Image (cartoon, rainbow, N blue to C red):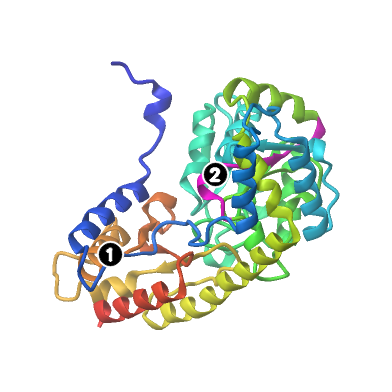
Amino acid sequence: MRISARAQRIEPFYVMEMAKSASAIAREAAGTDRPMVYLNIGEPDFTAPPLVREAAERAIRDGHTQYTQATGLPQLREAISGWYAHRFGLNIPARRIVVTAGASAALQLACLALIDAGDEVLMPDPSYPCNRQFVSAAEGRAVLIPASAAERFQLSADKVAQAWGAHTRGVLLASPSNPTGTSIHPDELARIHAVVAERGGITLIDEIYLGLSYEDTYGHSALGLSEQIISINSFSKYFNMTGWRLGWLVVPDALVDVVEQIAQHLFICPSTVAQHAALACFEPDSLAEYERRRQEFKARRDWFVPQLNALGLTVPVTPDGAFYAWADCRAACDKLFAGRSEYNSEMHEHGSWEFAFELMKRAHLAVTPGRDFGHADTARHVRFSTANSMPQLQAAVARLREALG
């Protein structure tokens, strides 16, 4: 069977390979006093709050399960618009909001609407691997630009200007970012968009972790800068609805009909039950619960990151959002592999890969190596997810302390 060149361009998603290995080791450890602790997947341990679950049950019971408009339930688009006004003080008309089958569908729709074969899209390195695969699936090419800790692992306006070429279509940013949990300073983001706009390009920004911002400096939507910015968002992270597969896209007025037409063909509509459930996300009781959970995520970060630093797993930039810690594992590798002449953390191509597998075997602790997230020193880093409960994080630190001596 001939496989398309498009499919062959899609890179493996190594974090899934790691997850499969973790599951195999976990089965062996079942029933022991050291079950696997999972800090490798970015999924909140919280699930949808009561009003959301009740709304889903009610929708099914009342038969509200048929197709909606391709752009989503009008009342849900209005509710999202209201959230932008209440949370961020922004006037985002509901007509510019397109409800999608998760942020993944939002990214696909944006890329298909805006990227032609051969177009290049600038992205930071490190960055979330799936985002660049959406560019590739639209026949474009993701151009990764190394971003340092001094730059908060984000692009700068100067780097965007320097990298811009004849085939550059625009930038795809993420703020807060996966894997680093860092955001772009609003002033720098404004400068980046100015560079892009001057060149007639597009600014796409992944804001799926925006609700989980912990510092006032960074907790602002890029949509406040310009109506031409395209924002991708999701009900998965802040709203704790990962498996419901629901997200949204905010686009300029000129793009709404284009995106709607593509969505009609590719998706028909997002899940109707999930949309009716999501309406309850914006009830006062639900929003209060989400804010309580946001503070819990912040408390986990505030405890866990200093613990990593003390163990030599240095987090060079404290995450200001999301639930990740991007840690330099070189010193920890030296400790973990002490006495093994075949290993040199400065020279080994996949240092964090070896480190993560050794932790799984020795400590029954699953973390994500940097391999998926780019090429700029990613082999020296591992990503820890702090989406787990505090007892799980405490158990992880105890196991790290034991493994690293």
Q: Vertical placement of 312 versus 317: above or below?
A: below
Image position of 279 (left or right of 361): right
Q: Which residues are magenta?
A: 240-253
> Which residue is at 69% across, 51% downward?
280
Label 1 vs 2, first from the N-terminus: 2
Judging by the rendered image, the residue that carries numbered circle 1 is: 355
Q: Residues within 10 Å of mark 1 (few under 14, many from 20)?
A: many
Is residue 245 magenta-colored? yes
Horizontal arrangement in the rendering, residue 38 relative to residue 98 (left or right): left
**Residue 164, can we see it?**
no
Q: Quadrant of residue 246?
A: top right
Quadrant of the image for the C terminus? bottom left
Q: Residue 322: percent from the left, percent from the top?
A: 57, 62
Q: Position of residue 171 (x, y in %)?
A: 63, 43
Question: For this rendering, which residue is in front, 335 or 20?
Answer: 20
How far across and how far down the image is residue 220, in percent? 74, 60
Residue type at tag 1: Phe
Which residue is at a point 26% across and 74% down the rendered structure image? 334
Tell whether label 2 touches label 1 (CB within 8 Å). Answer: no
Depth order, front residue of 246/138 = 246
Distance from the alpha carbon under mark 1 to that under mark 2: 33 Å
Q: Residue drawn at (54%, 30%), measured in percent from left and top?
A: 140
Report which quarter residue 191 is drawn in.
bottom right
Screen quadrant of the N terminus: top left
> Label 2, on which residue?
244
Find residue 133 and name its label. none
Residue 248 in magenta stretch: yes
Q: Residues within 10 Å of mark 2 (few under 14, many from 20)?
A: some
